[in-house]
Image (cartoon, grey):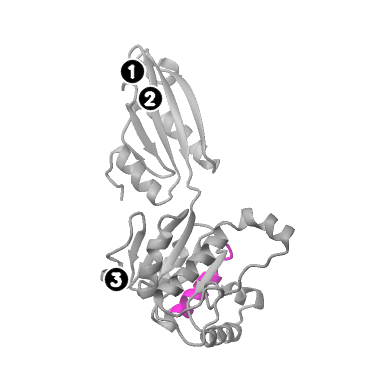
Amino acid sequence: MKRHWRWFEALNELQQNGEPLVLITVLATAGSTPRDAATKMVVTAGEQWDTIGGGNLEFQAIARARELLAGGSARTEVEQIELGASRGQCCGGAAQLLFEVLVSSRQPLAIFGAGHVAQRLLPILAPLDLQLSWIDSRPDWLADAPAGVTTDCLANPVDAIADLPEHSWVLILTHNHQLDFELVQAALKRPDIGYLGVIGSATKAKRFRQRLAHRGWSQADIERMLCPVGVLDIPGKRPAEVAVSIAAQLIQRLHANTAQPAKKATGLNWPQSRSLNQEPSE
C-alpha cells in the first residue's frame, strides 16, 4: 500500500531505512510550466511522492530517475526539458530538472532479540554507519529503540531472514536456543550474508556446530557462524560488557576494507572471538 507522505517526509523516512531514492528538483523555469522553481518530488524503484506538475514532464522525469537508480550509485544530473508538442505537453515553456540519486552506504544489520545485551548494544551501534533492523516477538521490548532503528515485531522472527536487504549482516541475541538455531540455518541459506554472529558460550557453539553438521551443512557454511560472538580481548560477562565486545567486532568489520592493507603490512592479526565458559545473558 502506498505511503502518503510529502516529499520531505518521504526523504527522511527512506533515508533512515537506507532505501535508494532520487530527489527531483525543478531548478529553473521559463515560460509556462506546470510548477515553479524549487518544486520537488521523491522517486524510488516502485513509488513516488509529491509532484513536479504531472503530465508527460513528470512521467519522463520518473522514468529517468528509475534509470539512474538502476545504476546503483550516487550521482547528480541536470536535464533541460522543453514542454512542447514533442514532449506531449502544450505549455510551451521549459523546465530545468536536477536529479539527485541518493544511495545509502550504510551496512544493513539485522539484530534478532531484544534482551539485556541488545538493549545495551543498540545505543552504541545507532550512531555508526549501519542500517539497523531490530526484530523480536515482544513489542514492549522493542519500545525503546534508538532513533533511526527500524523495529519489527514478528511472531516468528525467522520469517524476516528471507526479506533482509542483499549483503545484510545478522546478529542473533535471542533468549531461545532453538530459535537461535533456526535463525542460523535460515541465514546460512543466504550466501550473501557476510556476517553471522550468535551469542552464547563455547558449549553452545560446539552443540550448534554439531547439529549443523548432522543436518548436512558443509564445514565452510558452519564456519560462517561466529559463536561465541564478540572480541576475546574485551573480558566480562555482564550485558554491558558483552555489548561492548560485540560492538567492537562490528566496528572491526565496518573498517575491514581500509584496515586490510595495514594488517598485511604490519603482520597484525584480528582479535579472536569471545570464548565464554558460561552463557551470557541475552
For marks 3 and 1, give the one nearer the viewer: 3
Q: Amino acid at mark 1?
A: Thr
Q: State which region is magenta.
A: 180-192
Q: How many residues crowd mark 3 within 10 Å: few (<14), some (14–19), many (20+)? A: some
Q: Residue at x 36, y 54 (%)?
A: 148
Circles 3, 1 touching at the beta carbon (< 8 Å): no
Q: Main secondary structure of the magenta part?
A: helix
Q: Amino acid at mark 3?
A: Trp
Q: CA distance from mark 1 to mark 2?
A: 10 Å
Residue located beneath label 3 in the image: 141
Is label 1 in a helix, a strand or a loop?
loop
Q: Disc 3 or 2, which lies upstream in sequence?
A: 2
206 versus 129 height, above or below: below
Pick whichever, 187 or 18, lies toward us. Answer: 18
Q: Is residue 249 left or right of residue 5?
A: right
* Picture mark count: 3
Which disc number belongs to residue 33? 1
Q: Amino acid at mark 2?
A: Val
Residue 156, image x, y percentages: 37, 73
Residue located beneath label 2 in the image: 26
71 versus 120 height, above or below: above
